[in-house]
Image (cartoon, rainbow, N blue to C red):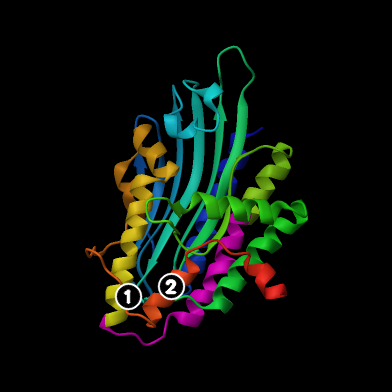
Amino acid sequence: MQIEQVLAVLKNVQNHICAELEAEENGARFVPDAWSSALGGGESRVLKNGAVFEQAGVNFSHVKGQALPAAATERRPELAGAPFEAAGVSLVIHPRNPYVPTSHANVRFFTARPAGREPVWWFGGGFDLTPFYPFDEDILHWHRTAQAVCQPYGEGVYAEFKHWCDEYFYLKHRGETRGVGGLFFDDLNRWDFERSLNFLNEVGHAYAAAYRPIVARRKNTAYGERERQFQLYRRGRYVEFNLVWDRGTLFGLQSGGRTESILMSMPPLVRFEYQYRPEAGSPEEKLNAYLQARDWLGLERG
C-alpha cells in the first residue's frame, strides 16, 4: 500500500472535477485555498457567484490523528482509539437555477493502526443527486452512469451500492430520501489495494460524466421567483441532513478538522418555512413522489 498513490489519484480527481464544472460556467473559476492544521492540510477550492453555480466547493484533505473519532468507528468498533491517516476529496455543488439539481460526491481513504494488530485500510465514497424539479431522463442518465462504473467490478456491485446510498442519504426525521440516490460505499477492502484504488478513481471521474450533461441540459431553463423560493426551501433539507446525519461532517468536526472546509457543503442561501405544503397538483408537489427509494433502472427495463 502506498499513500502517495492515493494522494496522486485524489488530487487528479479534484483537478478533473473542477475543470469539468468550470467548462459549464461563463468565466467563473474555482479559487484555491491551501490550509494546514495540527492534523495535516489540504486545499479547498470554491467557486462563488457563478452564472451557473451559486456556490461550488471541491475539497482535498490529508490528515493524521492519534485516535479515530466516533463517526469513523460506528461500523468498526474494534478500531476505536486507533491512530489513523485519512485522505479524501469531497464536493457539494449548489447551482443557481432551480432546475439544475444539487449534487454531492466524495472519495476517501482511511488507514488505522490498532495496537497489537496489523494496519487496516479501506476506501469509501460515492455520489448522489438532489433535484428540486426532477426529470426522469436526468435521473436515468445519473443511474446509468453509476451502473456503468460498477459493472466491471461485479454484477451486483451497482445494486449493492445503490441500495446503500438510498439508506444512507435518508432523513429519518422527515421520512424521505435526500434526493434520487446514486452510489455510496464504505469499508471497501474486498478487493486488493490496486483494484480498490482503481475503483475509487473511476467513481471520482464518473461523477462529472454523470452530472455535467444534466447541468448543460437544464442551466438555461427559464425560472421565476416561485421556483427560486422552492429551491431555497428544499435546500433546508440539505442543511438538516449534513448537520444531523452526515458522518463525514461529524468526522471532520470530531477530529478537529478545518471548520470552513467542512461546512463548505452548506448552501449560500436557504430558507425555512413552518408547515410548508406545496399546492396540490403543482410542480413542487411532484417532488414528493421522488423522495422514496426506487429501482430506477428496473423501472426503465419494465
Give the left or right position of residue 82, taking residue 297 as reference: left
Mark 2 neighbour class, 10 Å CA radius: few under 14, some 14 to 19, many 20 or more: some
Give the CA separation, mark 1 to mark 2: 10 Å
Q: Which residue is mark 1?
A: 278
Spot occupied by residue 182 in the image (x, y as percentages of width and height): 57, 60
Identify the amino acid type marked 1: Pro
Helix, strand or loop at mark 2? helix
Helix, strand or loop at mark 1? loop
List the single residue furthest toward the top: 116
Mark 1 neighbour class, 10 Å CA radius: few under 14, some 14 to 19, many 20 or more: some
Does the magenta run of residues contain 254?
A: no
Image position of 250 with respect to 79: above or below = below
Q: Pick the quarter of the image with the N terminus.
A: top right
Q: Main secondary structure of the magenta part?
A: helix
Q: Which residue is mark 2?
A: 287
Please tell me which residue lies in front, 12 or 104.
104
List the single residue furthest toward the front: 280
Q: Which residues are magenta?
A: 203-225
Q: Is residue 261 among the parts visible in the rendering?
A: no
